[in-house]
Amino acid sequence: MDNNTEGEAIEFHGDEEIIEVIDLNDTEPCPEDLADDLQDVGFEDAEADDDEGWETEDEMEAEAQQDDSELTFSKHTGSVFCVSLDPATNSLAVTGGQDDKAYVWRVSDGEVLLECTGHKDSVSCAMFSHDSSLVASGDMSGLIKVWRVESKEEIWSFEVGDLEWLEWHPCAPVLLAGTDDGSVWMWKIPSGHSKTLQSPGCQATCGKVLPDGKRAVVGYEDGSVRVWDLKHGSAVHVIKGQDGYLGALTCLACNKDGSLVLTGSMGGCSKLINTATGKVVGVFSREEGKAKGPKNEGESNSVESVGFCNILPLVAVAYLDGTLSIYDLSAQVQRHRCQHEAGIVHLRWEESSSVVSTSSLDGVLRLWDARSGNLLSEYHGHTEEIFDFTINREASLAVTASADNRAKVFCLQRPDR
């Protein structure tokens, strides 16, 4: 080292000869030097000047996960399959989920009023009785329980075969259920007195008590539809064969007075049935409801949900391929096709308007104007598909149930309000 020129250093590697001569007066700044220099920088001013070009991690996450909801109910530890509002006040919701539980909670603040436990499988059905005094919860294994909301006590339970659907009578404490073996059960609650509607030997896939309270319409896996007299337990009309479907029924809905029933099937066809005569009075074909594109006979495009508009002669049919078709009942022609990017799971008409809402596999709730076919608004917040949703009477809020283990409350805002 004594032979080095001033300002130079020799770098050694083990026993090797000199590898490199480094000018110590001309070295790159070390981290300590940079730290000293940065002390003189006005970070507050620089941050203010450059703020528009940067996003914090929280801001980026908020942008990626937009949430338009007013309240999130997060008590469930699995997917939330169903939701219903109490018909008396619309202030309470009941949700059922994959965690084998149902919860009754207040829509305004999410407070749990009743936890429905004791189920053996996912709770796929949960709903209030006509006067909101009772709530029924049913799991996929067929265990059904009824709870008194005010006292928070279980007052009745019964076990059937695998449960397909559950439905309260519109004006009496009577509960109906359809099962995998095709039976339709009817119980008086809480006495438990029961009656069974005869099975055709296949799954009872969907059912609805008509507004008169005297009849029920049930759809089956074999493509048949039956209109039942509840008092006598007999089938008034059987729609099958050419008038029925080739595939299983997936959904059905009735108009306000119960004179018409709209049904949907796995094959993508929807039929309108007169409940007084049992005659098919309208057919809305799969091809009319399909989005434009190459025809693919192997493509499944089932009807996932149907519904009637209360104020106009319109019906809506939602397809798995993401098409929402609005049909004119008088002319039986398609008026509008509203396309979604993902398959539609459920639709609901507002009670006193021409607005129809849809939930889809992309986790978005959408509102459509059936008069024009225009999209009115979208509501984001779920990270998985929305399995079910409901809207209050005033159409001011919606409550959703999703595979992301959450139920959410959305305040519905539209330009016409």
Image: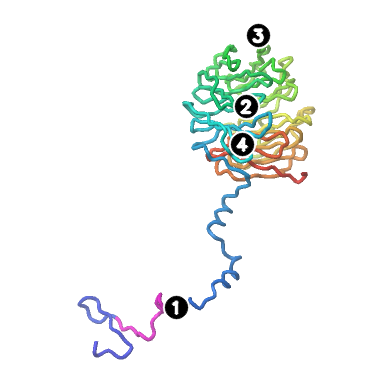
In this rendering, which labeled residue sits more in front, label 3 or label 1? 1
The magenta span reads 20-36
Q: Which of 112 and 278 is in front in this view?
A: 112
Residue beneath the point at 58% across and 12% down:
193
The quadrant of the image that shows the C terminus is: top right
Question: Which quadrant of the figure has residue 188?
Answer: top right
Label 4: which secondary element: strand
- Which amino acid is tagged 3? His
Q: Earlier in the sequence, mark 2 or mark 3?
A: 2
Label 3, on which residue? 232
Which of the labelled discs sits on residue 36, or is there none? 1
Q: Where is residue 305 in the image (x, y as percent from the top left)?
A: 64, 30
- Which amino acid is tagged 1? Asp
C-alpha distance separating marks 4 and 3? 39 Å
Q: Position of residue 183 (x, y in %)?
A: 56, 15
CB-based contact (under 8 Å), mark 4 and mark 3? no
C-alpha distance separating marks 2 and 1? 69 Å
Q: Which of marks 3 and 1 is nearer the N terminus?
A: 1
Left or right for 54, reference 252: left
C-alpha distance separating marks 2 and 3? 26 Å
Q: Which of marks 4 and 2 is nearer the N terminus?
A: 4
C-alpha distance separating marks 1 and 4? 58 Å
Q: Position of residue 308 (x, y in %)?
A: 72, 29
Label 2, on which residue? 128
